[in-house]
Image (cartoon, helix red, strand yellow):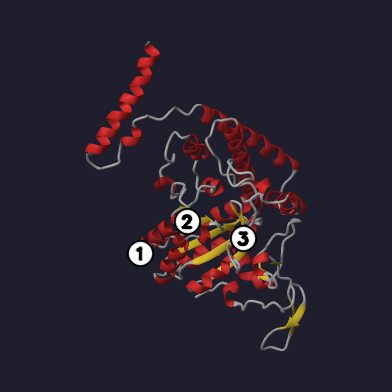
Amino acid sequence: MTESTAARKPRRSAGSKAAGTTGTKAGTGKRTTRTTSTTRTAATEGSETELVQLLTPEGERVEDAAYAEYASYVADITPDELRGLYRDMVLTRRFDAEATALQRQGELGLWASLLGQEAAQIGSGRATREDDYVFPTYREHGVAWCRGVDPTNLLGMFRGVNNGGWDPNGNNFHLYTIVIGSQALHATGYAMGITKDGADSGVIAYFGDGASSQGDVSEAFNFAAVYNAPVVFFCQNNQWAISESNEKQTRVPLYQRAQGFGFPGVRVDGNDVLASLAVTRWALDRARRGEGPALIEAYTYRMGAHTTSDDPSRYRHDDERAAWEAKDPILRLRRFLESANHADEGFFAELEAESETLGKRVREVVRAMPDPDRFAIFENVYADGHALVDEERAQFAAYQASFADAEGV
């Protein structure tokens, strides 16, 4: 059995050495030097939290032997694949920006932006196989892109013209889940079913740091552990559960919660698309091999509002956002592509044109969406007819007819 390096290693205490210092390897007497990427949060004040990072904010590859197991999953990545990851992030951000603008223009009722979380979503999304099954929340637009869901199909629900917009079984991508945390249980149940079917597919469930406080998520962890379900729990920790910060939700880093349920947890730099890709490949591989669940905490940041009905300026400071903008996932990969001579100005110019074309198509499709059948809400409530539903349908029909009568007067 291959276990997460992060899960095996003892956690450092408050008085342990900082990353990059020289120490003695236990049991060997040898002096070693580590350059482990670490982060410090209010929730873990006085202790270090390991962060798997393969690409620095400056666009430089990280060579850390401690994470060689993860790095091996992207060791043979080609320049073409790197450009593909960059393209995915750029187009996903462009789509997201267009959707936000459409909401501001009154074309959508609501929108949940992924701005800043592109690397976590594209990296993990590209780690999935076609036969894997994905259970998203309502913000996984980048994962939907990776699964081949037409981005315009994501907008029907937010415009109020349908209840989803795509066939979940067509792309093995479940409909968006509005109820916070419930999809973790759905994913676990599906993964348990895969085991009974004898398939070697994996399941991945997405949720945010706020959802990690829900009882459904803890129940999913326990079921998945006890039944050794092939499910990966992917938590996008974007630092804010609407207006509640992490330190008001947890006393320990989120990924460490997995230990209490008996499976490995890893914190990855969620603004590093290579690290997100590598760690998710690792987790899905071990799940498919029958080694059970894993928890990935993608440490990232929500650059915009929770949704378009939110005003983040009321609960966080501009300097916090500025600090995270310096870690921008798209700029990070662009710096690497340029420094490694994997992309030229022609590539970036062509992608910019493609981005504008996508934005135009999204606007046109949304504005052309037909109004839904007003009576469709009464269909498929019960397999057979139901007296109360029939009564409600008749009342609604009379109400609609009253407007027609008024117009004819």
Separation of residues labelled 2 and 1 (CA atoms): 27 Å
Separation of residues labelled 1 and 3 (CA atoms): 39 Å
When the figure is inspected, residue 246 is found, relative to residue 139, above or below; the finding is below
Question: Closest to the observer: 131 or 236?
Answer: 236
Separation of residues labelled 3 and 2 (CA atoms): 17 Å
Q: Amino acid at mark 3?
A: Asn
Quadrant in the picture for the C terminus = top left
Residue under numbered circle 3: 246
Image side of residue 58 versus residue 70, left or right: right
Q: Earlier in the sequence, mark 2 or mark 1?
A: 2
Residue under numbered circle 2: 181
Question: Closest to the observer: 19 or 3?
Answer: 19
The label shown at residue 198 is: 1
> Considering the numbered disc 3 on the image, is that residue within a helix, a strand or a loop?
helix
Crowding at label 3, few (<14), some or many (≥20) Cα neighbours within 10 Å? many
Crowding at label 2, few (<14), some or many (≥20) Cα neighbours within 10 Å? many
Q: Amino acid at mark 1?
A: Gly
Please name which of the two marks, 3 or 2, marks the residue nearer to the observer.
Answer: 3
Please name which of the two marks, 2 or 1, marks the residue nearer to the observer.
Answer: 2
When the figure is inspected, residue 190 is found, relative to residue 65, above or below; the finding is above
Q: Amino acid at mark 2?
A: Gly
> Considering the numbered disc 2 on the image, is that residue within a helix, a strand or a loop?
loop
